[in-house]
Structure formats: structure tokens, C-alpha cells
Image (cartoon, helix red, strand yellow):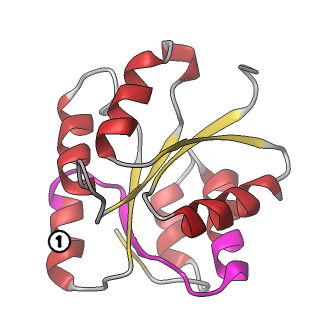
Amino acid sequence: MDSNQRIFLLVDDDSDDRELFLEAVESLDPPVQCLVAIDGQDALDLLASLNDEDLPEVIFLDVNMPVMNGWDCLKTIKQQEKYKHIPVIMCSTSSHQREIDTAIDLGALCFCVKPEKFTTLKQIVEIVNKHLGDNLQEELQKSKTVSFKC
């Protein structure tokens, strides 16, 4: 992998959501590599297979998935020394306060309701790419394009 290129990890079981996310990421400049997993266990297996320099810089993690849901995956990521530093943005179609609170309590950087418009999704990945490692949480909260709970 190109060590100068940012790496995102998307964990989502919905093929349409994955396709749209990848399309949004492809529009980023500079380019970003996007790894994909279809459930929490697949994500953990993928992370375990990577060298330290190839770990993602951010994880977009869906809540509701088969095999291993986002909550269990997030718990495992945040318990492991090798991965706990990676910011995780939990994503769901739900906007229930209980889920938002759970995400933050388990160590997610933010909770995001999946956007209905592709342009909004593009804006999300642009904000993350631009501000990753530099006040990302603040920039997401300030975003006028989508409601983030951090």
C-alpha cells in the first residue's frame, strides 16, 4: 500500500451503502484508499491481517449487521491496544438517543445518521479527509451538512 495515502475502513453489510460510500471516497483529492468489510468479524479479521503502517486512519462502522454487529466490533476495537487509537464513526439509519449514547460510551468518536443524499455523503467523507487528526470531532460537530453527535 502507498504509505502516503490515507486509509479509511468501511464496515457495512449493505451493498448499496458500500457502493455509494466508495463512490464518494473516489472523488476525494488527494486520493484515499478505502478498505471494506461486510460485518464486524470481517473487519476484525481484516485489521488483524494488516501491518501497523497499513492500518486505517478512521473506521466508519455500521451498527446493524449480521455475524457481528457494530457494537460488539467497536467494543473489541477499543479494547485492543493496536487499534484503540483509531477513530470510529458509528453509522446507522436510526437516530435514537440511546444508540448515540451507547456509541459514545463505547468509545466512538461520533455517531452519524446515514445520509439520504449522495451529496451529503460526499461532504461527510470530505470533512473527515480534510480534518482527520486535526480537530476532526469539532469539525464534524460544526458541519451544517449532517447531524453528528460527538
Residue 66, magenta (yes or no): no
Residue 116, magenta (yes or no): yes
Type of the residue with mark 1: Asp
Viewer-side residue, 35 vs 142: 35
Residue 105 position within the rendered picture, expressed as x and y whole percent measured from the top left: 15, 59
Which span is picked out in magenta? 105-123
Viewer-side residue, 84 vs 113: 113
What residue appears at the point 66 percent right and 80 percent down from the top-left corner?
120
Residue 34 position within the rendered picture, expressed as x and y whole percent measured from the top left: 64, 43
Q: Quadrant of residue 76?
A: top left
Residue 109 position within the rendered picture, expressed as x and y whole percent measured from the top left: 36, 56
Residue pushed farthest top?
Answer: 51
| Image side of residue 105 versus residue 100, left or right | left
| Image side of residue 5 versus residue 76, left or right | right
Residue 150 vertical placement versus 109 (above, below): below
Q: Quadrant of residue 64?
A: bottom left
The residue at which mark 1 appears reads as 101
Q: Dot 1: few (<14), some (14–19), or many (≥20) neighbours within 10 Å?
A: some
What residue appears at the point 79 percent right and 53 percent down from the top-left corner?
26
Quarter of the image with the C terminus in it: bottom left
| Image side of residue 129 versus residue 110, left or right | right
What residue appears at the point 46 percent right and 83 percent down from the top-left corner?
147
Quarter of the image with the N terminus in it: top right
Residue 103 vertical placement versus 142 (above, below): above
What residue appears at the point 57 percent right and 48 percent down from the top-left corner?
134
| Image side of residue 9 versus residue 42, left or right | right
Residue 32 position within the rendered picture, expressed as x and y whole percent measured from the top left: 73, 42
Viewer-side residue, 26 vs 145: 26
Label count reads 1
Secondary structure at numbered mark 1: helix
